[in-house]
Amino acid sequence: MPVKSMEDLFIHTLKDIYYAEKQILKNLPKMAKQAKSPELKQAFEKHREETEGQIERLEKVFETCEVAARGVRCEAMDGILAEAKDVMEEVEDESVREAGMLAAAQTVEHYEISRYGTLIAWAQRLGMKEAQSLLQQNLDEEKRTDQLLTKIAEQSINQKAKA
Ligand SMILES: [Fe+2]
């Protein structure tokens, strides 16, 4: 798709985060299954459910733009998730692996927070009120997830991981 205007760029970025959310949805069950710490497992399971809702909100944003909901490959998210997979497969020590998985999950959240922040600013500029509010709801959830992961890291995972 040629990007010529702010509207085009908005749609392109929307497709990027839509793809990213779908990849995350696919990967979270694997991460939840691998997680040994009950807090981390629960955080991944909860965020899987939230991600389903986030995808639905993104589909509504596509609707408000009268554009078919379709993703466009996001190399950044593919890379982050490939690294998460490496950690899950290659780190033998359980507590160290948990610390690595948690860090990967936070990288995912930070990517999403950055994307949603940008999309919200552009939606505001383009006068897309409904899209702005839907995207804001996704951003708020990502920020809460990020905070929860920080808490789990500080209170348990990083304590347990061997020096
Ligand atoms: Fe998300």
Image: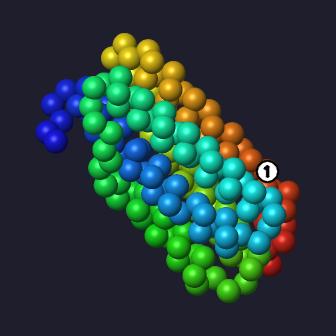
Residue 13 makes an appearance in the image: no
- How packed mark 1 is, by other alpha carbons closer than 10 Å (few <14, some 14-19, many 20 or more), is few
* Residue depicted at x 54% and y 27%: 136
Q: Is residue 50 left or right of residue 147?
A: left
Q: Quadrant of the N terminus?
A: top left
Residue 52 image position (x, y, % from top left): 54, 45
* Residue depicted at x 41% and y 62%: 78
Q: Is mark 1 within 8 Å of ligand 1?
A: no
Three-letter amino acid code at the position of disc 1: Lys
Please, is residue 36 above or below residue 42 in the view? below
Helix, strand or loop at mark 1: helix
Q: How many marks?
A: 1
Q: Is residue 72 left or right of residue 34?
A: left
* Residue depicted at x 28% and y 26%: 66
Q: Quadrant location of residue 67?
A: top left
Q: Quadrant of the C terminus?
A: bottom right
Kindly identify which residue carries mark 1. Answer: 151
